[in-house]
Amino acid sequence: MEIILMISMVIGLGSFTQGLTGFGLALVSVPLLSLFIDVKLAVPLAGILGWLVTFPIVWKMRSHIQYKTALILFIGSLPGSFIGASLLKHLPSDIILIIMGLILIISGIYSFRSKTSLFKSTSPVASAGIGFFSGALGASVGEPGPPVIAYTSMLPWTHDQTKSTLVFFFMLQMIGAIIGFWYKGLLTDDVFSYVIKAIPAFIIGMLLGMFSYQLLHKYNINYHRVIYSLLIIIGFVLITKSL
């Protein structure tokens, strides 16, 4: 019972984060879950729930999604998952994480200081490249999100466009990840048992996160500055994890 309570609290925190920002359930949940359950349970558990949380958000924000960019990012991530993993496997994962962490910190600090968006518009070539990088990182070190989060946060999009497009991209990308979990035999009875027992906390966290996102609008809190702050925090987490 104590383990279920701890899992529920962590999943609730993770789903709140994703409901608020459009990403972060796995990023928040996996390190914490790994403190008291096997990481082979933590990763697919967070992956399944991280995928489920995307559906209500995508439906609610469907009119704001930049479908073309999201699909290019997704298509770019597919070869990245295969080709990129083989290219990156020769580098130590710690080095990859440190480089990614530094990129996120620099991107976040630059975005905080900049008065205008780094990119004036989306580029199919840049989007495909970012998608490829995302897929490669996901396949090699299990961190596909940071490149896409950094890229979309530096585009001249509204808060709703940024969040909805991120969520739609992750919804598509997680399909492949879940198929991979199944292929590797990671979708065990224990995983499904934890998923079912964590559903109440998952729903509460998601709804609170989505409600908090509406409060950002109501009180005119800058969503992009929230994202920039998280980029910097994630960057430090990745570097710390690799040391």
Image (cartoon, rainbow, N blue to C red):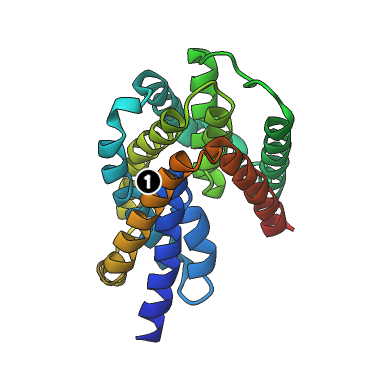
Q: Is residue 195 visible?
A: no
Q: Is residue 236 shown to the viewer in this render?
A: yes
Count every numbered label the image shows and give the total. 1
Vertically, is 168 above or below 180? above
- The amino acid marked with disc number 1 is Ala
Residue most toward the bottom? 1
Residue at x-position 52% and y-position 33%:
148
- Quadrant including the N terminus: bottom left
In this view, the residue in front, 1 or 121, is 121
Q: Position of residue 3 (x, y in %)?
A: 40, 81
**Percent position of residue 46, x then y:** 40, 59
Instruction: Determine whether, in the image, residue 63 is placed left or right of residue 95.
Output: left
**In the image shown, does 129 or 205 lie closer to the viewer?**
205
Give the residue at mark 1. 177
Residue at (37, 46) in percent of width and height: 177
Q: Residues within 10 Å of mark 1 (few under 14, many from 20)?
A: some
Q: Secondary structure at mark 1?
A: helix
